[in-house]
Image: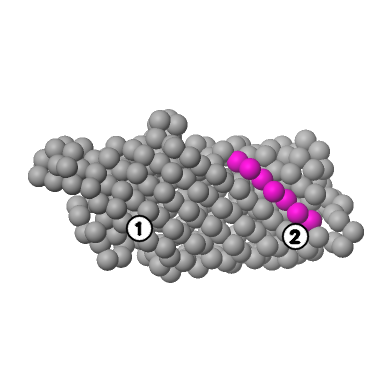
């Protein structure tokens, strides 16, 4: 259940990159500027991004011994089989609807805690994480904004663990789980100049998992009223343990994103 493994999350977040004198709009992690808007007052942002995230933590299936994974983001491309991520936002005045979707298929080496049950462990994991939330701008001025947000994140994880050597050598187990966590937090941005801004967010929640958290901080640049880019750092952690299935990991690493507003 733990799609831990260097979890390169190629996903989309739409941080916000508004210009001075206008309200701003932000989605999960990449930002875009909020300017004139559509005739009916709605503004939309979509943002693909690359998250080069390493992963560390523990995963287990069917009550078998936990496999510990510890992979830096430099190992990501060696372990990633497939990844798709995207984020979007719809904003009307102070209200917003945000979405963030991440899907990855990863394969990596791991180890057992004592090294006696197996000399090495092969882990293959498929993970889907989808966030849907709503926000309200409690602060909204010419230099930036601050939103209070609430929503839910759905996780669906399938993990296959194969043991090599030792007592469990030759054994393989596949297990998975799907659960929902309620999430709440803040997100916002602040313009240092008409083109350069700071942006970020922090969310924490619980539900199916004991704890689910997500933080990000980035520096953005507004190329035009419709296109902006953000570079930053994101860390996401989840601790899920139910009926022998364990998914307790932290994924973190640099993120690069491009936001398109219309």
Residue 219 place in picture, x, y as percent: 64, 39
Tell me the number on the disc at residue 81.
none
Q: Position of residue 48 (x, y in %)?
A: 63, 43
- The disc, 1 or 2, on the residue closer to the chain's N-terminal end is 2
* Element under disc 1: strand
Residue 209 percent coordinates (x, y):
39, 64
- Mark 1 or 2, closer to the camera: 1
Q: What are the residue bounds of the magenta stretch?
A: 43-49
Of 187 and 239, the residue lying toward us: 239
Residue 218 is inside the magenta segment = no
Q: Is residue 75 above or below residue 147?
A: above
Circles 1 and 2: CB distance less than 8 Å?
no
Evaluate whether residue 145 shows in this view.
no
Callout 2: few (<14), some (14-19), or many (20+) C-alpha neighbours within 10 Å? Answer: many
Q: How is the image coloured?
A: one colour
Taking the spot 34% from the left edge, 44% from the top edge, the residue there is: 124
Which residue is found at the position 50% from the left and 68% from the top? 182
Pick the quarter of the image with the N terminus: bottom left
Which residue was labeled with disc 2?
91
Horizontally, residue 9 falls left or right of residue 193, namely: left
């Amino acid at each position: 259940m733990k799609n831990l493994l260097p979890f390169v999350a190629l996903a989309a977040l739409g941080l916000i990159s508004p210009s001075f004198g206008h309200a701003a709009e932000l989605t999960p992690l990449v930002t875009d500027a909020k300017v004139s808007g559509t005739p009916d007052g709605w503004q939309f942002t979509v943002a693909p991004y690359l998250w080069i995230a390493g992963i560390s933590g523990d995963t287990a299936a069917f009550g078998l011994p936990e496999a510990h994974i510890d992979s830096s983001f430099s190992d990501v491309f060696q372990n990633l089989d497939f990844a798709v991520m995207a984020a979007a936002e719809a904003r009307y005045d102070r209200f917003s609807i945000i979405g963030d979707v991440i899907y990855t298929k990863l394969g990596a080496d791991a180890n057992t805690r004592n090294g006696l049950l197996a000399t090495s462990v092969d882990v293959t994991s498929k993970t889907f994480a989808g966030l849907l939330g709503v926000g309200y701008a409690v602060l909204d001025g010419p230099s930036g904004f601050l939103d209070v947000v609430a929503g839910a994140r759905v996780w669906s994880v399938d993990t296959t663990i194969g043991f090599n050597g030792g007592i469990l050598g030759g054994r393989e187990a596949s297990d998975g789980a799907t659960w929902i966590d309620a999430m709440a937090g803040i997100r916002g941005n602040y313009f240092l100049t008409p083109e350069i801004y700071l942006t970020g967010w922090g969310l924490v929640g619980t539900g199916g998992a004991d704890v689910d958290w997500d933080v990000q901080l980035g520096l953005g640049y507004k190329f035009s009223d419709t296109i902006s880019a953000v570079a930053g750092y994101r860390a996401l952690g989840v601790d899920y343990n139910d009926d022998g299935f364990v998914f307790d990991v932290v994924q973190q690493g640099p993120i690069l994103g491009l936001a398109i507003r219309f």
